[in-house]
Amino acid sequence: MRVVVTGREGQVARALAERASSAGATLIALGRPELDLERPQSIAPALAAARPDIVVNAAAYTAVDHAESEEAQAFAVNAAGAGAVAAAARALGVPVIQISTDYVFDGSSLLPYREEDATGPVSAYGRSKLAGEQAVAAATPDHAILRTAWVYAPFGKNFVRTMLRLGEERSEVAVVGDQTGCPTSALDIADAVLSVARNLVAGPGDPALRGVFHMAAQGEADWASFAEAIFAEAAAHGRAPVAVRRIATSDYPTPARRPANSRLDGTKLAAIHGVRLPPWRGSLAACVARLLQQEALERQP
Ligand SMILES: NC(=O)C1=CN([C@@H]2O[C@H](COP(=O)(O)OP(=O)(O)OC[C@H]3O[C@@H](n4cnc5c(N)ncnc54)[C@H](OP(=O)(O)O)[C@@H]3O)[C@@H](O)[C@H]2O)C=CC1
Ligand SMILES: Cc1cn([C@H]2C[C@H](O)[C@@H](COP(=O)(O)OP(=O)(O)O[C@H]3O[C@@H](C)C(=O)[C@@H](O)[C@H]3O)O2)c(=O)[nH]c1=O
Ligand SMILES: [Mg+2]
């Protein structure tokens, strides 16, 4: 199975590159300048040349706060770009997997979100990603939209690496405690995406395998308790302890609003695709261990 992913250096793209061979897949990553989601005319030729059995659109404009002042660019990449990727996949006669986000919800529900729950993004990023879901669905019926959340990896830009960096500079970090979600490892996402890809390729006419699915780690955390877990893992590897001061969202002003609750319910993905991501705590432990091992190696003379 030839899996073509958009974006070369993104967390999910790099995780797919790392995990593909153990899933018996060949991974081809396409990025700028050859494939630029802001240049729709670049997309179909780049995808065609890569001869995919399936396309995964993992590239996106992901700077949540910057998107508030660059909404047009966020829409160009996340909405028009995603639609163009899906249209190109359709022209090639292959399915597309669109990676989407928990930020399509407004966060007012007290329960984990299910696929049929009403969306209502409260940020420009969330609006652009919801428009992307709609553009993909309009472009081809042969799609799976996989919504994930709070992605981290041993590489790329993410909350885990930010906390480990801050923890080297300070003995206390202030973190919001009133936003709850599902911290999800990009490596677990990669394994799940590859399973879904296999199912879509093996079941070309099966509408049940298509549509929207929630794909996040099991369990839940708020950002403050997630930070506490990161520092606990680091301390287990000999790092100095770091205290987390739990603050309210109102004490941490940001340009973008974020949902108070964006937990995702993975029941549908498990029932239909047989895929359940692991609980977040063990995946976090593996990520922190790998980061600190890399760091120790880099420090060796
Ligand atoms: N990060 C998160 O917490 C979450 C992410 N998601 C979604 O998951 C997907 C993967 O996210 P993640 O791996 O974290 O993303 P990253 O921010 O790590 O990477 C995004 C990638 O998109 C590429 N990209 C941006 N603009 C363009 C463009 N115009 N043309 C081509 N490529 C472009 C970037 O390229 P370059 O390296 O050149 O900048 C980068 O490789 C995205 O769809 C995101 O919306 C969903 C929930 C949570
Ligand atoms: C760095 C830092 C952040 N925070 C807060 C800000 C924010 O509410 C929360 C997380 O910060 P981030 O910048 O990682 O959040 P954010 O970039 O909003 O993360 C989101 O990214 C997009 C792409 C998604 O799709 C979402 O699922 C989600 O992962 O923690 C603190 O309270 N203290 C800190 O020191
Ligand atoms: Mg961010």
Image (cartoon, grey):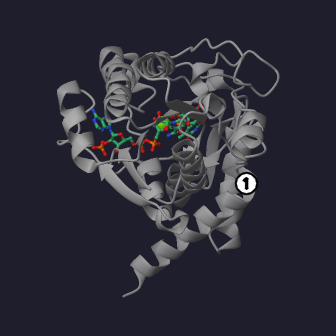
Residue for badge 1 = 278
- Asked whether, in this view, residue 19 is left or right of residue 244, the answer is left
Q: Which residue is drawn at 66% across and 30% down?
A: 208
Q: Is residue 256 above or below residue 235?
A: above
> Which kind of residue does numbered mark 1 sit on?
Pro
Ligand 1: image quarter? top left
In front here: 186 or 134? 134
Q: Residue at x 51, y 17 (%)?
A: 123
Q: In which quadrant will I find the N terminus?
A: bottom left
Name the outermost residue toward the right: 111
Q: Residue at x 65, y 25 (%)?
A: 249
Q: In which quadrant will I find the C terminus?
A: bottom left
Q: In this view, does 66 lie above or below 134?
A: below
- Asked whether, in this view, residue 96 is left or right of residue 77, the answer is right
| Element carrying mark 1 | loop
Q: Residue at x 59, y 46 (%)?
A: 199
Q: Where is residue 73 in the image (x, y as percent from the top left)?
A: 30, 21
Q: Where is residue 198 in the image (x, y as percent from the top left)?
A: 55, 50
Q: Position of residue 23 (x, y in %)?
A: 54, 63
Q: Is residue 241 visible?
A: no
Q: Position of residue 242 (x, y in %)?
A: 66, 57
Q: Which class describes the residues within 10 Å of circle 1: few (<14), some (14-19), or many (20+)?
A: some
